[in-house]
Image (cartoon, rainbow, N blue to C red):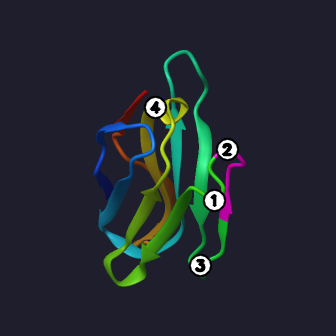
């Protein structure tokens, strides 16, 4: 079993910054893609950013130039640095990871979500 634990959400004023962290733990052989999605009330869950095991990144157009995704492979941890936050960034942010377990099975795992609220 693999668990993803997120931290770093909170309330911030527009223009401010937050840094989200997500650590994967458990019966892990390796972790491939890691990423962040978000879901605002009444909206569908949407991709924010993804980073491959080799460090290649993909961003939603709405966050390009403001958000930076990174990872520490030794700690199986992914980060999302969010700068110049806007009220429309308000959402629950979910971490995701594609992990291979110690029994060599590959699954998609999701964190429990962390609330980010940006006030105007």
Q: Residue 65 carries which label?
A: 1
Local secondary structure at mark 4: loop
**Of the numbered discs in the image, which one, if any, rests on residue 62?**
2
Disc 4 or disc 3, which is closer to the eye?
A: 4
Mark nearer the N terminus (4 vs 1):
1
Q: Which residue lies furthest to the right in this view?
A: 61
Question: Residue at 62% of width from left, 38% of height from top?
Answer: 46
Tag 1 and tag 2, C-beta contact below 8 Å: no
- Which one is in front, 33 or 47? 47
Identify the main secondary structure in magenta.
loop
Q: Position of residue 104 (x, y in %)?
A: 48, 73
Which is nearer the eye, 26 or 12? 12
State which quarter of the image contains the C terminus.
top left
Can I make out residue 1 in this image? no
Query: Which residue is depicted at the point 33% across and 40% down?
Result: 112
| Disc on res. 84 | none
Callout 1: few (<14), some (14-19), or many (20+) C-alpha neighbours within 10 Å? few
Q: Is residue 35 left or right of residue 103?
A: right
- Please provide percent x and percent y for residue 67: 54, 57
Which quadrant: the N terminus? Answer: bottom left
Q: Which of marks 4 and 2 is nearer the N terminus?
A: 2
Q: Nearer the viewer, residue 16 or 6?
A: 16
Categorize mark 4 by other alpha carbons within 10 Å: few (<14), some (14-19), many (20+).
many
97 horizontally vs 114: left or right: right
Residue 59 or residue 106, whichever sits in front: 59
Q: Name the residue under label 4.
A: 90
Q: Hey, which quadrant is residue 92 in on the image?
A: top left
The residues bearing labels 4 and 1 have C-alpha atoms spaced at a distance of: 17 Å
Q: Is mark 3 on a helix, strand or loop?
A: loop
């Amino acid at each position: 079993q693999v668990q993803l634990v997120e931290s770093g959400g909170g309330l911030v004023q527009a223009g401010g910054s937050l840094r989200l962290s997500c650590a994967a733990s458990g019966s892990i052989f390796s972790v491939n893609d890691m990423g962040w999605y978000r879901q605002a009330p009444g909206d569908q869950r949407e991709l924010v950013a993804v980073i491959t095991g080799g460090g290649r990144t993909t961003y939603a157009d709405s966050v390009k130039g403001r958000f930076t995704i990174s990872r520490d492979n030794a700690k199986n941890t992914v980060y999302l640095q969010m700068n110049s936050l806007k009220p429309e960034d308000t959402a629950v942010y979910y971490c995701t990871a594609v992990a291979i377990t110690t029994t060599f099975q590959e699954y998609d795992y999701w964190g429990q979500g962390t609330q980010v609220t940006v006030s105007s």
